Image: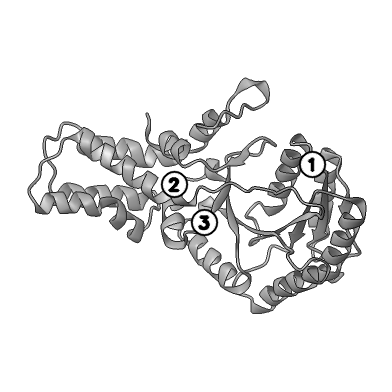
Amino acid sequence: MSKDVAHGGRGFFARLRSGLARTRAVLTSDVSDLVRGRTAIDEALVDELESVLLGADVGIDACERLLGGLRERVRRNEAADAGAVLAALRRGMLDILAPVAVPLVIPARDAPFMILMVGVNGAGKTTTIGKLAARFKREGRSVMLAAGDTFRAAAVEQLQQWGTRNAVPVLSQHAGADPASVIYDALASARARGVDVLIADTAGRLHTQGGLMDELRKIKRVAAKLDPTAPHETLLVLDAGMGQNAIVQARQFNDAIGVDGLVLTKLDGTAKGGAMFAIAHALGLPVRMVGVGEGIDDLRDFVAEDFVKALLDA
């Protein structure tokens, strides 16, 4: 379990558990009601469990993976009590999540480590940038932000507010400026200043609009002119409340520009936290971090064991 402790003494695990309350209410209570008092399992029970998991937006494919072993035991007429059913569900969840729980590691290097943040409108991308900046500052790293969303003045203002709050510079240009130019200049400035981490914001683009994906590809090409290895991490921010639609978004971003890792936000505002299993099963992309609130400390590394424990333990 994560040992991080937030300001005021409340650990992140407690906030994760609180944030998953709506999903846990949908999932755990119903599962417990179904298996309580059972001395054996049957096909009907497995079907009911599947309905509960789907209600938490776990998804059909991930459900089948979680319940496949249980179905096989039914076919072989092997009885199992309620405890065995819950233990099997817990193991299955960990089997899905553990391989994708890969934290973001920033290696020691002379040049800036560039993180390109992408995602659709409303996913919480700019807020995530601000929280990341705070995290890196706490780790003793120097940080710069690049305001690559030049189409919305409010986006630049929001990023500048996070810059002020974290005492980090924000490079921006006039409204409507070429985002690739903004980010190129920011990377050049970060290199000149010896900055450790550059976090580049981009417009909250709709994944179905090919022209906007072309712009992201341009940003990556232009950054590579200064540093052939940049960007070093392309992070896709997904809103947990989008459920299965998040998988569609992730696939299209990954196909278009390549995604190195995922950040799942707003777990505290949804009963669809089960989508984490669907996303992990369908994509296999590293889940770097999860967000469970608006506080600056409410974004932390994704730990599979913590997630399952917070979701299943009453």
Q: Position of residue 209 (x, y in %)?
A: 64, 75
Amino acid type, callout 3: Met
Identify the residue at horizontal 78%, vertical 62% (top origin).
149
Residue denoted by label 3? 242
Colour setting: one colour
Residue 123 falls in image quadrant: bottom right
Q: Residue 78 versus residue 249: which sits nearer the camera?
A: 78
In the rendered image, which quarter contains the C terminus? top left
Identify residue type, mark 2: Ala
* Number of numbered discs overlaid on the protein picture: 3
Whether residues under marks 1 and 3 lie with C-beta atoms below 8 angstroms apart, the answer is no
Q: How crowded is mark 1: few (under 14 residues within 10 Å), some or many (20 or more)?
A: few
Q: Tell us which disc is closer to us: 2 or 3.
A: 2
- Tell which of 145 and 161 is nearer to you: 145
**What element does badge 1 sit on?**
loop
Above or below: residue 281 compared with residue 169: below
Res. 59 image quadrant: bottom left
Look at the numbered discs 2 and 1 and tell me whether their residues touch, using CB distance below 8 Å: no
Residue shown at the point (26%, 51%) measured from the top left: 67
Q: Can residue 265 be seen in this view?
A: no
Q: Which of marks 2 and 1 is nearer the N terminus?
A: 2
